[in-house]
Image: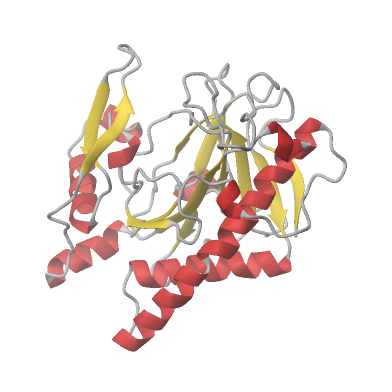
Amino acid sequence: MAEQIERAFSSKGCGAVLIKLDRRHSALYERFYRLQWQLGTRAFDTDVEEKAAAIEFAALDLPVQHLLCRCGLGVARARKGRADAMPESLLDVEKFLRTDPTSLTNAIGRPLALNRKEFHPSVEWLLQQEQAGSLRQNNNSSYEVVAYTADRPGSEIIGPSQADEARLLALYQEWKSATPEEQRGDGNKHNGDVYYGAFRGRIHMDAGSTMTVLLGPGEVRDCRGFPVAVGTKSRELGGTLMVAPPSEKTFTSLPYRLPCGSPYVVVFFEDHKGGQSATRVGEGIAINANALGWTGTRHGVRRIEDTGFSRGQAVVHLRLTEADLA
């Protein structure tokens, strides 16, 4: 199914594990992100075509979650020393995920839901929609906790639970008028309220679960819906995940594809400190990744440097017990 081939950092149990996909799962990867781009940019001639694509896209949720769960479990077992780390049989994904396994939260912008698929259309596409009077806006958006302040433990920051097309364009226009220093950083935007075509994702560390698993580092596509050319450096266009160990200030931007041209899955551990218990009722105690020497990974997303490119993503957070690694 997949082959673990390298880490963003070669030692000490931190960084990201990159897992090369075989031909069948590479096709799944391509179909998933092609459909996401088509639906996210309304690239259909008829409503019938759009409806059929939406049904097919929803049907890919379970295969994608199954792939991500197998990769995450395989990495944890490999770090535990098991020779047969990658599970061969089908997994009960509901056992490992916090939310309803039949579907991933589907959103424009970056939602706060844990297990999700998100899409950031290109700035140029948003401007075209604005000019045509078809920019979509959700007037009933809910607000949730988007972050906790580091200087005052327990202090909550409230923000929109997810963006919409109008909000994404407003964020880009805000970025255009920001100072050069803010433009280079996250502009003090928390991850529940950020557009990767403008401000980059705030550097943070996931907590409260066991590990984060992503279908690629962020799928960046052009105005025709095609992925960037093989060999393109991630720093040229941005939009991919960047990761670093807690003790280092230098971040590694993950590539769009592996050197062989293959898409891949990204796996990294979360911070156990301060996280809520991830115990599954009746199934044992969740592993403490920190106690096993699997340090949580600081990460963010590089800002997209070209206004003609969009970004897609799918991510799940796994809860593993010691029994899962036995």
Q: Check the image and name the residue furthest to the right.
A: 83
> Which quadrant does the N terminus fall into?
bottom right
> Which quadrant does the C terminus fall into?
top right
Q: Is residue 257 above or below residue 181?
A: below
Q: Is residue 24 above or below residue 177?
A: below
Q: Is residue 78 above or below residue 240?
A: above
Residue 216, visible in the rendered structure:
no
State the residue at coordinates (33%, 60%): 121
State the residue at coordinates (73%, 57%): 260
Taking 198 as reference, is 114 left or right? right
Q: Quadrant of residue 290?
A: top right
Q: How many marks?
A: 0
Residue 44, given in percent of the width and then of the height, sits at 34, 82
Residue 48, given in percent of the width and then of the height, sits at 34, 88
Residue 202, given in percent of the width and then of the height, sits at 38, 32
Q: Check the image and name the residue furthest to the front.
A: 282
Colouring: secondary structure
Residue 251, given in percent of the width and then of the height, sits at 54, 30
Residue 30, visible in the rendered structure:
yes
Q: Nearer the viewer, residue 51 or 136?
A: 51
Taking 83 as reference, is 183 left or right? left
Q: Nearer the viewer, residue 81 or 198?
A: 81
State the residue at coordinates (66%, 36%): 8
State the residue at coordinates (32%, 11%): 151
